[in-house]
Image (cartoon, helix red, strand yellow):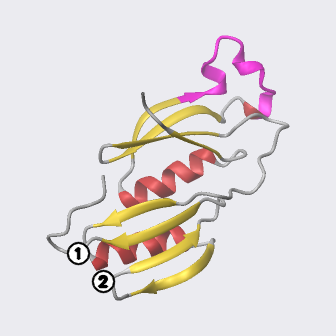
Amino acid sequence: MQLDTYIFYNGDCAAALELYQAAFGAQIAALIRFRDAPDGGNAPPDWQDKVMHAVFQVGPNAIMVSDGRYGQPRKDYSGFTLSIAAGDAAAGERIFTMLAEGGNVLTPWQSTFWTQGFGMLTDRFGVPWLINVVHEGEAQAA
């Protein structure tokens, strides 16, 4: 059995993928546009270049993404947060700053009693993030 995360971006998926590639080195493992489907995904002409399905990877973790279905906008994300364990404070702060641009900072980047760096934000696409620095020598959560 496998449990996966699938995020819908209401037409902004390609821009989100570009941000995640720049912010934390996400690798695009798969990318299918509506125009790639035999019937164009039954999408209108202005959606043919939108992302029907994609997968990006960060280390061993894969997240599936899509622009969603035209005419069916998603509601705000709630009840979850994507979490990144950065290897050091400089990397964590760089990722936090890039994801926060145009978004909403919930907890500013700061040192805490448990780590050298921590912050929470919602990126400009509405996706919630928690960035945490793993202490040197500390094992990352499985």
Residue 59 visible: yes
Q: Residue furthest top?
A: 38
Look at the image and tell me whether residue 23 can be seen. no
Which disc number belongs to residue 135? 1
> Considering the numbered disc 1 on the image, is that residue within a helix, a strand or a loop?
loop
- Given residues 64 and 114, the one toward you in this image is 114
Quarter residue 46 falls in: top right
Q: Position of residue 67 (x, y in %)?
A: 67, 40
Asked if residue 31 is among those painted magenta in the image, a careful observer would answer no
> Residue at point 52% right, 74% down?
120
Q: What's the magenta region? A: 32-46
Amino acid under disc 2: Gln
Judge left or right: residue 130 versus residue 115: right
The residue beneath circle 2 is: 116
Image coordinates of residue 125 in percent, x first then y, are 65, 59
Per the model, the C-alpha gap separating discs 2 and 1 is: 7 Å
**Numbered badge on residue 51:** none
Q: Position of residue 41 (x, y in %)?
A: 71, 20
Mark toward the start of the polypeptide (2 vs 1)? 2
Closer to the camera in the image, 18 or 97: 97
Task: Relative to 84, say whether 108 is above or below.
Answer: below
Q: Dot 1 surroundings within 10 Å: few (below 14), some, or many (20 or more)?
A: some
Q: Residues within 10 Å of mark 2 (few under 14, many from 20)?
A: some
- Quarter of the image for the N terminus: give it: top left
Task: Say which of 52 and 114 sits in front.
Answer: 114
In the rendered image of this protein, does residue 112 appear above or below residue 142? Answer: below
Marks 2 and 1: CB-CB under 8 Å?
yes
